[in-house]
Amino acid sequence: MVRYILKRFLISLVTLLGLVTAVFFLVRMMPGDPFLSDKLTPEIRENMLRYWGFDRPLHVQYLHYLGNLIRGDLGISMHYNSVPINRLIADAFPQSADLGIRALMLAVVMGTTLGIVSALNRGRWLDYACILVAIIGVSLPDFIMGYLLQFVFGLKLKLLPIALWKGFKYTILPTIALSFYTTALLTRIMRASMLEVVHQDFIKVAKAKGLSTFQIVWRHQIRNAILPVVTLLGPITAAILTGTFVIESIYAVPGMGKYYVLGIQNLDYSQILGLTVFYGAFLVMANFAVDIVYGFIDPRIRVDRRERGA
Amino acid sequence: MGNLVEIENLSVSFSTYGGSVHAVRGVSLTIRSGECLAVVGESGCGKSVTAQTLLRLIPTPPAQISGRVRFEGADLLGLTERQMNAIRGDQIGMIFQDPMTSLNPTMQIGRQITEGLREHHPSMRKAEAKRRAIEVLAQVGIPEPEHQLKRYAYEFSGGMRQRAVIAMAIICRPRLLIADEPTTALDVTTQAQILELIGRLKEETGMAVMLITHDMGVVSHMAERIAVFYAGQVVEEGPAAEVFRRPSHPYTVALLRSRPRLDLDRSQSLLSIPGTPPDLFAPPAGCGFAARCGLALKVCRTHQAPPFALKDSHHSAACWLHHPLALARHGEPTRERLEQEVCHAR
Amino acid sequence: MEAAVERSETQEVMDESLFERATDQNGLEAEHLVRPCLTYWQDAWIRLRKNKVAILSIGILALYVAMSIVGPHMVSFEYKSIDEMNMDKAPSALHWFGTDTLGRDLWARVWVGARVSLAIGFLAATLNAFIGVCIGGVSGHFGGRVDMAIMRLIDVVSGIPYLIVAILVMVALGAGIAPLIIAMILIGWVSMARLVRGQVLQLKNQEYVLAARKLGASDTRIIFRHLIPNTMGLILTNLTMAVPYAIFTEAFLSYIGLGVQPPNASWGLLARYGSQNFRFAAWQLFIPSFFICTTMLSLYLLGDGLRDALDPKLRR
């Protein structure tokens, strides 16, 4: 198990380094630079570039950036006069995380539940209802879902607030909009997984032991069927996190998405870089955590994945 | 010895997209207390389905089951699910073919072994169940049983897993153990060990064993009685020694001749039975084996043969060659004749 | 000779002639195959044809493709032509899908947008699948160090969030159709590669592959004649599922302003501009959204149908 954790940790580190490198150089490839403005004289421009260290060779800048990163310093925003990126994140991340975690929880709970209900009622109307929800859910991009909910429940029915972030009532629509796709995805996966497990011999063995249906489903079927869902938690977290960009803008939630989009529009190198690295690190960590959790749930994985041809 | 299990005229069919598969067609069998009945036949002949029907493991629908299955006098097909659960695992234990997939990969072995016990004895304390699990693991020959409880299936070899599966099946001391091809997935030395283990457990506990196999060799050491299945029917049934000495259905003869034997000289090649079993989507009107049988009579193509009792009254074969008219016309179908005809015809 | 019928039910009087030897010695030939011989693909096609939902999906997709070709010509408006007198007009007999903020006819724009959206979706997914199959096939077939290196690469690449990289590539290369496809390919091949590798690993130890190898078949022959055909069902199903994801990605990137640029049109871009006035002109958002959703829906349903049709376990 220790070897397994260590191996996963190393892979995460390499991934992170690869991400930082890729992002650093991609950002520098962007056409134009933040000081391309008619209002600036060439002299000021020169000074600005020197001030930000852009006159130095690229690899020196890169190493300098890595050095700062290791100390936990994500740099300073160019656009918001000298605000540290760390401060931007501290301001905006709680709202994004709040929304993201709500959506993630809702999606996981709803998705697995619907998947289980659907599989256990295979071929009956409840199953078809779940499949219908699932298939519609994966076919609705989250920004469309966001507007649709806003239109129906906010504008037409006037049941819930259209936008802003001022209490529980305000969180309902964005949370549903953000989690709907993932819920649907998990429903599909959980259902398929349940149906696959039910044909395994050990389910028959459990039945031959005289266990009740409830015990078979709970102890044997669900426990094994949930494994693929756990492996997907990493990508799902990523999907929800990127989904927050648009959902935040639709519902005017004061989160990180705003700064990210603004950073892109202003070509604010350090802001894009800082926020992307933050997102990336967050997701790599989430993947790492999922790997570890998976190792605990599935005893086989601890040995060697190659043995099983996985 | 009384009859523990009485199966009467059991038929099982499955509805599929392509029509109905008649997997079991009018099977009647008995298993006496404490005896070992071997059910022999090639894959797809309905032996596993019959066994699983005994525990009602076959979901209906899509399956349709008719006939009667009595266990200690109670009609299993008429019981409620709850009553059936009280029998499963407690009165009847079952071992499946593949030990690799019979164990839940994410549950500790100890818990898998005790869960059946605790289900049937809800008042039993955890420590007591654990003690019993260690006892059973020792009984099935797993070394250092107290250390194995916390391990997972993937840490066990195939033979060890099958032992664990057997431990799961016998922990409640069932009256009947159904072993569905328990050795097919194992290598040869392990096969012998597992069979010996099942035989020893039978002697020790006095339980009856229904041993399902496609391998006549497996049967010869253990079984007291043999039932030969073909195309969803019992074609021959009788005491093991009798069936081996005087096989009376052409299929049984062919089956015996198709396994390697040390007592025949090498020039006699192994027989492979040509042709394939009938399509059970549309079973033939007559004997299922007629199309592959060198001795087939006209009647074999049109009528199902009833079981004909042979000289010793416990041995019977469902073959028209034993009908008085056939005997009068063609003489007695002795083993030699059957062997010659069945094998010669190729 | 003393043998007797045990049970009485068959004690009917039987014609003695029945007990003659069955004369035709060709008993074995009587056993003809009842079911016709079908190849894997014929069989799959028959089962797919029975699946009404899948056929309906194919119909919808075909309709959209056809409309993307003829649709813009069905109205007299050019998709780019601005009409200041007819801004934000609701759907009517004249403008079937209404007009946008600049008075452009939405019917024309939707079907021109369909060209872009569908082309990007199919192209990106196909390229992804192609790259994924090659890399996965090589990795699984050769194993050893090659496999090790590729797997580590896959581990690393799949750890990087897809949309973030897509966004960055778009930012670096500039918005447009080509950068959009490049961005989608850069990471999209991973899941297919993983899938194919797993399949190949499973297949390559099967007896028929070993037999082919022992008979002297070359690597290329084994890969193309044995491994890929047997993985094709899975690849095809996965490809069908990847197209809607590619369409979604295009829509998402165009929606946040990084994809297709005006005056060009794509469904995602139309949704983006529609969303800006959706409080008073909801059709501008919901019409392109409807096409995005139904296209994705049809593709997913078709994928489901294909999976069922191609699953050898369901073959009868």
Image: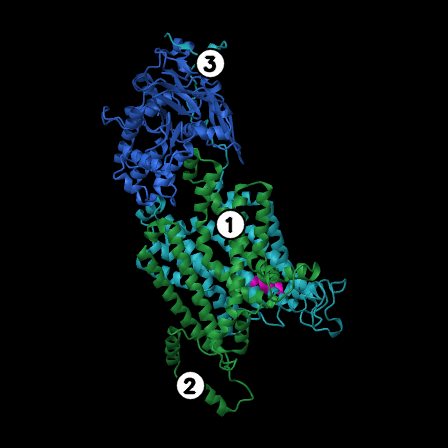
Chain colours: A green, B blue, C cyan
The location of residue A183, given as percent across then percent down, is 54, 54
Amino acid on which the number 1 mark rests in the picture: Thr
The location of residue A267, given as percent across then percent down, is 51, 78
Front tag of 1 and 2: 1
Quarter that holds the N terminus of chain C: top left
Tell me which numbered mark, 1 or 2, is placed earlier along the sequence: 2
Element class at badge 3 = helix
- Provide the residue designation for mark 3: C18
The residue shown at (48%, 62%) is A238
Q: Which residues are magenta?
A: C113-119
Element class at badge 1 = helix
What whole-number distance in Å separates the C-alpha atoms at marks 2 and 3? 106 Å
Disc on res. A55: 2
- Provide the residue designation for mark 1: A112
The location of residue C246, given as percent across then percent down, is 53, 61
Element class at badge 2 = loop
Q: Chain of mark 3?
A: C
Judging depth in this view, the residue of B310 and A7 nearest the camera is A7
The location of residue C54, given as percent across then percent down, is 58, 48
Front tag of 3 and 1: 1
What whole-number distance in Å separates the C-alpha atoms at marks 1 and 2? 54 Å
Q: Chain of mark 1?
A: A
